[in-house]
Structure formats: C-alpha cells, structure tokens
Amino acid sequence: MDFVEKARIRLEHWIKHNDEHCEEYAVLAQQMEEAGKSESAQQVREVMELSSRSTDCLRKALKALN
C-alpha cells in the first residue's frame, strides 16, 4: 500500500470519527440545556462548530488526494 492510499484511509477514519463526536456533542448539549446549563450547552455547541470546520478541512484534504 502506498503513502497516498494510507493517507486516504487515515483521513476517512478521522472524518468518520469527527462526525461521530459531533453527534455525541449534540446529545450532550441538549441534555445540558434540559438541565438548565445553557452556558455549558453553548460551549459544547461551539466545539461542534469548530469540529465541523476541521472535518470540512479533512474532507478537502481527502478530495485533493484524488
């Protein structure tokens, strides 16, 4: 397996991993809201946004490998 194929596999893994974390963050933020912890929920939502942006970069990197 060459370097590019290995890089592709790693990027695909990280994208999936980030997407899974975002799903978990959304659940946690909702639970925090329901518990009356709005500030904490907002901070977790900020993490979601940052994570989404980083995942977009990973997707662009994967596309550029082709």
Image (cartoon, rainbow, N blue to C red):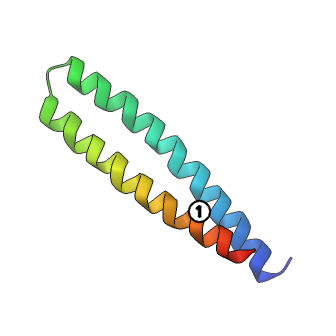
The x and y percentages for residue 59 are: 59, 62
Please count the marks in the image: 1
On the picture, is 1 further left or further right than 29? right
Q: Secondary structure at mark 1?
A: helix
Question: How far from the left and from the top, in percent, is residue 49?
Answer: 35, 50
The C terminus appears in which quarter of the rendering?
Answer: bottom right
Pointer 1: what residue?
59
The quarter of the image holding the N terminus is bottom right
Crowd rating for badge 1 (residues with CA inside 10 Å; few <14, some 14–19, many 20+): some
Mark 1 residue type: Arg
**Above or below, comparing residue 59 to residue 3 in the picture:** above
| Residue 50 falls in image quadrant | bottom left
Image position of 18 with respect to 31: above or below: below
Q: In the picture, residue 7 is in which quadrant?
A: bottom right
Residue at 50% over, 66% down: 57
62 left or right, relative to 36: right
**At which x and y percent is residue 12?**
67, 59
| Residue located 30% across and 31% down the image | 29
